[in-house]
Image (tube, grey):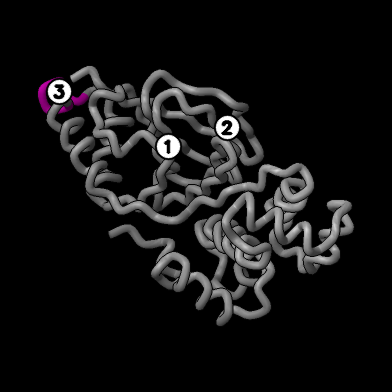
Amino acid sequence: MTAILFKVLDYQAGTELPLHCHEDGQILFARSGSMEVRAGNQVVMIPSTRIAWVPAGMQHSIRFRSDTKMRTAFIRPEAVCNDFNNLHVFQITSLFRELLIKLVEDDKCEQDYRGLLERALIKELSLLREEPFSIPLPVDARAKRVAEALCEEPSNTNNIADWAQIAACSSKTLGRLFLKDTGQTFQLWRRHMRLLAALHYLDDGLSVTETAHAVGFSSSSSFAEAHRITFGFPPTGAKSVS
């Protein structure tokens, strides 16, 4: 089977791959470490228990939040269904993880057997559960300046009035811009962004309490509840692979 090309790529923390695209669709998986992918106005967080799917031709950049062992697969568009025309984040199963690692890292696998594993990988990909591990960035330059600053410092507790001064507009205008560009109020957008930032801390082994404080929640209980409501599982669940 020649529909998939696999690569082993390791990166140091802080490395950034600028905007680029591929002729094929791409699976991004961190064997260890974590990644932040940007495509259009979407920011996607990928801890080591998730994968991202980047469709063919989509411009995207990748930032490595920690030392990362990236394992990637390039799949021809005709090998997947039309549901894979957009950027997605999926929870990986143990089967998918082992199939991907076997195919990426074992270059001595017998060809017929390898073809069977590749077909199984594509089938398993179609069965993975999508998760809300992405967030839209505002388009307006004023709101985007605030959003970028919060992405860099999720623990910042400035209120909307403080941020409005930085954005050189009124609090009402800033709130309107976030709602218009992201579909979320400023407060809800910041909470979702903090929850996404928390994925990296949890993946690095920090406790729920440490993570809650690192991303600006006032208590571990409020963080755990927001995490459960948004993602459907408690914070410790981010480390599990079903």
Whole-number angstrom distance, CA of label 2 to CA of label 3: 34 Å
Residue 218 placement (x, y as % from top left): 68, 78
Residue 50 part of the magenta segment: no
Residue 32 placement (x, y as % from top left): 46, 46
Specify whether 211 is left or right of 168: left
Q: Earlier in the sequence, mark 1 or mark 2?
A: 1
Mark 1 lies on a secondary structure that is strand
Mark 3 lies on a secondary structure that is loop
Magenta region, residue range: 109-114
Q: Earlier in the sequence, mark 2 or mark 3?
A: 2
Taking depth in this image into account, of 144 and 65 the one nearest to the observer is: 144
Task: Name the image quarter holding residue 5.
Answer: top left
Whole-number angstrom distance, CA of label 1 to CA of label 2: 12 Å
For the point 55% across and 57% down, which residue is it? 196
For the point 43% across and 39% down, which residue is it? 87
Mark 2 lies on a secondary structure that is strand
Is 57 situated above or below 189?
Answer: above
Is 1 situated above or below 193?
Answer: above
- Read off the residue under disc 2: 61
Is 198 situated above or below 118?
Answer: below
Residue 95 placement (x, y as % from top left): 22, 48
Disc 1 crowd rating (10 Å Cα; few below 14, some 14-19, many 20+) is many
- Read off the residue under disc 1: 28
Q: Earlier in the sequence, mark 3 or mark 1?
A: 1
Which marked residue is nearer to the observer: mark 2 or mark 3? 2
Q: Which mark is residue 110?
A: 3
Quadrant showing the N terminus? top left
- The amino acid type, in three-letter code, at marker 3 is Glu
Whole-number angstrom distance, CA of label 3 to CA of label 1: 24 Å
Specify whether 140 is left or right of 68: right
Q: Which mark is residue 187?
A: none
